[in-house]
Image (cartoon, rainbow, N blue to C red):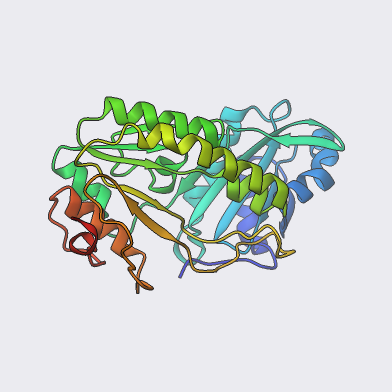
Amino acid sequence: PFPTYPKGFPADLIAAFERAIRTSILGNEAASGTEIIARLGPEHQRTGYPIVYTSADSVFQVAAHEDVIPVQRLYEICLTARRLLTGPHAVSRVIARPFVGSPGAYTRTDRRRDFSLPPTAPTVLDAVTAQGLEVVGIGKISDLFAGRGVTRSIHTRDDLDGMAQTGAAMTATARGIIFTNLVDLDSKFGHRNDPAGYARDLEAIDAALPQVMGRVRADDLVVITADHGNDPTTGSTDHAREYVPVLFGGPAVRGGVDLGVRSTFADVGATVADALAIPWEGPGTSVLPMITK
């Protein structure tokens, strides 16, 4: 239900944004992030105007060279946009997209930040923290939930750092949820139509997985899934909305269980709540009885 803007944002909204940040903007179109930065980056460096763009998703993205608009100022600009984007223009996320480099060789940095709308209803993370348990968000998890229901947030450089931070958190966390987002398959390779890079990153994640699984305790439940597909071979820079896998593992999990096609992604959250013995009356059906020994 979040609004999207395939033709760019309305003129009155952009005018209000420019007044609020006291500068003009460049762009205001639906575009690939790397493409619009490559195309408008030189003008941005010359004028100092931030680059605004969107995608097929409900996002308001602001890109700026770190030497032109310091990262903290970029975050302030995005917070201003977040405050403006309400009511019919309440996009799901405002995203800060800092980059570095020179014309023809721009590179986005790992200091991206997402400024999301808070969840519209209680989440499993809320239920878990309400019981005094930890929720460790690794990657952009805290950003996606607007910080709600997350007791500790760890931002990461890349997917391998995410895997390493996950392993470290497993050692440091007594009981609760460790929620890791590995974003590079999406942002660096899926959106960029780079199947070779996608394959290399997936292989690197696979190679790091035994280090994580080696720290699994007797009562731990491991869930590997995705929120959407991003096939790097489609020719589109947008998400491919194919079905996603849901894999459960751990010492107490039975192998070879076919869960079929689930009717809602909320089954994952309900299963996690069930595994932690947390009362949950929200959406989803736990599959824990189906998968445990």
Q: Residue at x 46, y 44 (%)?
A: 181
Q: Is residue 3 above or below residue 79?
A: below
Does 209 sit left or right of 20 as displayed? left
Residue 70: quarter of image: top right
Q: Is residue 262 above or below residue 128?
A: below
Q: Is residue 41 above or below residue 127?
A: above
Residue 193: quarter of image: bottom right
Q: Residue at x 29, y 64 (%)?
A: 267
What x and y, as percent, mark residue 234? 70, 65
Residue 165: quarter of image: top left
Q: Residue at x 70, y 52 (%)?
A: 195
Q: Nearer the viewer, residue 129 or 225?
A: 225
Q: Residue at x 71, y 64 (%)?
A: 236
What x and y, as percent, mark residue 273? 20, 53
Note whether residue 246 is visible: yes
Residue found at the very far front of the displayed protein: 256
